[in-house]
Amino acid sequence: WGEGFVIVFTEIVFGFRKWKSHVTERPFEDRSDVVKELYSELNVIKPHTGHLITCGNVVYVLLFGWWVSLAYLLVSILMFITIIGVPYGKMCWKLSWYFLWPFGKSIQEHRVSTYVWLLLGYPLLAVVHSLACLISWLLVFTIPVAKMNARTLASILLMPPENLSGCETRALLCCYHAVNWYYYKYTVDGINVFAVNLLPLVIVSLVIGYVDKGNQFASSEVKFATAVGSIIPLSYYIGMGIASISAQSNFAVGAVVNATFGSITEMTFYITALLRGHRAGNACLQEIVKSALTGTLLGCILFIPGICMIIGGLRHREQRFNSRSAGVSSALLFISVGGVFAPTLFSKAYGNLVCDNCTNSTGDNTTSGSFACRNCHYDLNNYTLFHSHIQPLVYTVSFLLPVAYIIGLIFTLKTHSHIYDIHVGEGHVTGHHGAVVHWSRWRALAILIIATLLMSACADVTTEHIQPILSQPNISQYFIGVTVLAMVPEIPEIVNGIQFALQNNISLSLEVGSCIAVQVCMLQIPLLVLFNAFYDVGFVLIFCDLHLWASIFSVVLVNYIFMDGKSDYFQGTALVVVYLILLASYFFAPSPAGC
């Protein structure tokens, strides 16, 4: 999420976010020229040999230039009418032409004079520049326009007209391009600009969710969309808080922090949904939780590696990754998925298939003719089967998976950490010695706690207003769970994976997906089982057939892809296409019985 921060290549191992790319700060002088340009000031005249008539600059004129220039023209006329404000009228006239096309021009300073004109012209221009600054900042890629308007508002307009001239003295404002596509790397105090811009969405979501109880100002669909969108910046802040604390702590503290907060985004939603469903007697929310768990697995096993392979392969043709570490991750995926779905396979092996709503070709329930059944399922209400066999198996699996997780942490981060040394291109990288952590422990802990509380509130709003979305007749409830609810919290990790792939570090991109999948199976699901054991919300670790076979097939496929230690865009395309086929299956699948 920001090139101004160095990547330490032992960052994500076995679901353990030891170090993140946006947590450690690289010295400014070591950054690339592209990044230095993002943070450059607008009061320096630089040699410019390129064309000033660019697509971005023309877009500036259409989006901002004409109405900012018109505002200056109107203020200029107002100043001329007052007679006494003629000097300021001349200044506004010049600035009107400047802001219509500011590129390559400069505003310079001469001597100090009076500020009387601020009572007449400054208020209107302050509103104009504030509006232009806000819009251009929210668009991100036009941040140079935001900087220009902010500097004009805070400095240029506070100077008397005699100080502004075209002579070659000290430059006050000079801009060459309105748009820079690399501003997706821009950070504010270590926080990516997109996370900063999305933060107000959290406030909006909570206000309309808790104040507008009667849906007078916003519908349930709007509240659901804003609450889900709020998860994106909050998951980013939680990830930064976890990584900052882990990076400054020893192995034990880092492991505890990761295990405690690493899945807090998803767990908050799952538990909130299960509680609300239990209180309302709505079994559909339990199926939504299972769909979200499966969707996260499928997305992390297929989509994240696939999209990273495609983007990395298009840039680097063929990329190599650490086949041994990938083999460890593959084995962990087999263990994880096998353990999670063991109770489901057991129930299908020993359960009784029961079909309801069966009618024959004659329309009655006689034994003659062929039957058509609308609702077939395995009967698990039998005490002997479920309570004496399946439930103990669920508890056993939920105990063994976290134990395997702990053993994996010791293996990958202590005794065999050398197998995770990353090869990038022809080089060999294990870390970066000049990096310093950007957030202190206490600051990271405070942000982590606040973000977690806000996440709980947003999850409550999401589950409260999810029913109208689930009631859509043309969309399967399975599809909603495996897409929106599963993948939205993982957007920051997807961005990280893509960034690693572009830097020719596909090994770390693959570890991003594996890390999340392992955490889902070895931490999140056992925690849900433990929660249900202490507070029975009806969560049963038995998945439908579509979840079962989609997950098993995905693990087999990705293990086959990882065998040779090489990746290209074709292999990535195969993974993404299979993921889309599975999504299509969920889209056309009937909703869970009774929902």
Image (cartoon, rainbow, N blue to C red):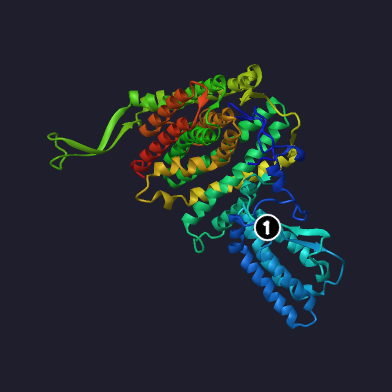
Q: Is residue 181 above or below residue 158?
A: above
Q: Position of residue 238 (x, y in %)?
A: 63, 40
User: Alpha-carbon neighbours of circle 1 within 10 Å: few (<14), some, or many (≥20)?
Assistant: many
Residue extending farthest top: 415
229 and 500: which one is in front? 500
Residue 517 appears in the figure: yes
Pointer 1: what residue?
146
Residue 122 appears in the figure: no
Quadrant containing the C terminus in the rendered view = top left
Q: Is residue 103 left or right of residue 88?
A: left
Callout 1 secondary element: helix
- Identify residue type, mark 1: Ala
Quadrant containing the N terminus in the rendered view = top right
Q: Position of residue 442 (x, y in %)?
A: 74, 39
Q: Is residue 587 left or right of residue 526?
A: left
Q: Residue 390 lies in what quarter of the image?
A: top left
Q: Is residue 549 left or right of residue 407?
A: left
Q: Position of residue 549 (x, y in %)?
A: 38, 29
Q: Is residue 116 above or below residue 203?
A: below
561 and 404: which one is in front? 561
408 and 35: which one is in front? 35
Q: Position of residue 221 (x, y in %)?
A: 46, 55
Residue extending farthest front: 49
Q: Is residue 186 left or right of residue 463?
A: right
| Tally of numbered tags | 1
Q: Is residue 170 above or below residue 90?
A: above
Q: Is residue 139 above or below residue 279?
A: below
